[in-house]
Amino acid sequence: MKLWLAKQRYLIDFTLASLARRKTRNLGLLFVYTVLVFMLASVTLYTHALRQEAARVLAASPEVIVQRMVAGRHDLIPPGYMERIGRIRGVQKMEGRLWGYYYDAVTKANYTFMVPAENPPAAGEIIVGPALERSRGLAKNNGITFRSYSGKLHSFIIADVLSQASELVSADLVLMSEQNFRAFFDYPAGHYTDIALSVANPQEVRNVAVKLAAALPDARPILRDEVLRTYASIYDWREGIVLALLSAAILAFGILAWEKASGLSAEEKREIGILKAIGWETGDVIKMKFWEGLLISLTAFLAGFVAAYVHVFHFAASLFEPVLKGWAVLYPRFQLTPHIDGLQVATLFFFTVVPYAAAVLVPIWKAAITDPDSVMRG
Amino acid sequence: MIELSGIRKAFNQGRHNEYWALDGIDLSIEANKVTALRGPSGSGKTTLLTIVGCLARPTEGRVRLEGEDISGLPERFLTEIRRKRFGFIFQQFNLIKGLSALDNIILPAYPTGRPRRELLDRAEELLAGLKLGHRRNAKVEWLSGGEQQRVAICRALINDPELVIADEPTANLDTHLAGEFMGILESLAGQGRTILLTSHDPLVVESDVVQRVIDMRDGKLICHE
């Protein structure tokens, strides 16, 4: 065992010396490799964290949202609808919601006006999201005036600004009282934008949706699971787009690595011949080259992954943010919760380190099993 | 020490450019003697040396080391024999560029797993013996031809081999350095080592140090002196 360890130490010593001897080439390879791992890891870490964030935020949302459709478009819920839903078994809680979009010509952005279910602001006051606070330079107790779609001006006092923790979903939010909301949008009394339903038994959600569709043929039930799935597909799609764009880089690296790994230079072949001639076994040569491949790929993997982690969780993935987060005038500014998925790391490791280490071995093995007599012939 | 019987070696066997580099060699190399293979280019000297040194296998024939047939041994065993019993001095020196003289010398001992301190002490001793101690940390590409050859000799001796094999050892040296090499050869012979070399340099083959010269031509032995 001691002898084996001593041999491995010698092999690693020689490998490190070999790497240092071809400093420029190996550093170049290491740099390209690290950049590739960095890009791949950034994309996967970011989209994974976004999916987690969306799931976390949506976990508190209602199980079912009922919208009314007219000519395939979303329309207001008329009075009497709530009573009809109330009769469906399994519905635990029901709540008519008021929300709408408002285009602000000043910031050229859409805001979401909403009446919160709990603790709504007092009449004449609003609570705004952090992106709105930034774009309009607002602060608590400031006044702001919006011109409604009917042309009338409505003035409000900022009662509060929402916390940044919820910015992913509240960046463009404006919370107001029911009275102000109805007055601002000329919403008829008894009408709602949609209805949020709570279903006590999660197994019953689909049944409730089926019953809803039967009882109210013009209603569209939207399940929380569907929303989650939609978010997941959006992020999957965006991840796919970025990976497709990166595929050129991946391919370029693949060619570089293959060329480096499969095409041993004459100098390397000569060295293998010398080592074998002076008494190194084929296995020793292969082990030495395996250590070399492993050292390069592991270093690149660790450096790339750590850089990606810092990039995503400390610099908000600034390189890929516009593509991955989606387009918006009011970009939410938020810090993603660091989250590393073991399977994700293993997959990335498998697709970056293993192919390289394997690609290095095949040509080395070919070179290492040839007779060492070529060194005699210069 | 080494007996060769009916040795034939073909290159590109079975192809249109098949070539027999050795054609029926029967030879006995005695222990503790300096033997030289002499012959023109293409006579098969180096090929014979690679077969004796277990660097290549014969196409036909038997190689016996101390009476044991080694021509059919698997690669691993041949490597072990090479490492433990033979030391090689190549015509082009074949040192690993970028490594120091000391690192090059201890390289053949890596697979033995011997303690590093022991290897370094032995390497220092060998370097001092060849008056090269002051160049121990110099990268080999910075050394002169004569210095490189002395490093190669040290490397050949690091595992304390019984047989030293040298291929055209003076081919890249001027007369003065070739003379120095013959001095080293004499001291190695004085230590009781068996030496087998190839050369067509009169300075070598006509030297008193060489006890036996074997002439070769067209892959065959001509005569034994």
Image (tube, coloured by chain):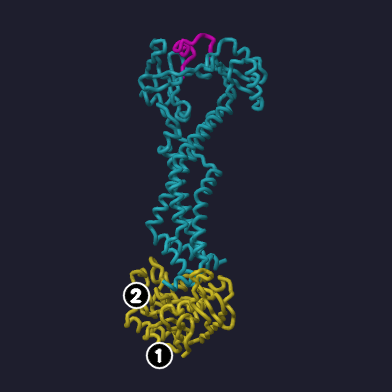
Residue B63 is tagged as: none
Rendering coords of residue A137 (x, y %): 35, 24
Q: What element carries label 1?
A: loop
The three-letter code of the residue at mark 1 reads Asp
Residue range in magenta is: A175-192
Q: Which badge, 2 or 1, comes first in the chain's sequence?
A: 2
Task: Name the residue at the top extreme.
Answer: A189
The three-letter code of the residue at mark 2 reads Gly
- Is B84 part of what is drawn in magenta? no
Residue position for label 2: B145
Q: What chain letter is assigned to the residue under label 2?
A: B
Of residue A355 and residue B104, the one placed in the foreground of this image is A355
Q: What chain letter is assigned to the residue under label 1?
A: B
As displayed, is residue A41 above or below residue B113? above
As displayed, is residue A305 above or below residue A150? below
- Relative placement, left or right, of B89 versus A287 is left
Q: Is mark 2 on a helix, strand or loop?
A: helix
C-alpha span from label 2 to label 1: 24 Å
**What residue is shown at x 43% (from left), y 18% (from top)?**
A102
Is residue B141 shown to the viewer in this render? yes
Of residue A340 and residue B143, the one placed in the foreground of this image is B143
Q: Tell me the yellow chain.
A: B
Q: Residues within 10 Å of mark 2 (few under 14, many from 20)?
A: some
Of residue B89 and residue B103, the one placed in the foreground of this image is B89
**What residue is shown at x 46% (from left), y 90% (from top)?**
B225
Residue position for label 1: B208
Q: Name chain A's colour.
A: cyan
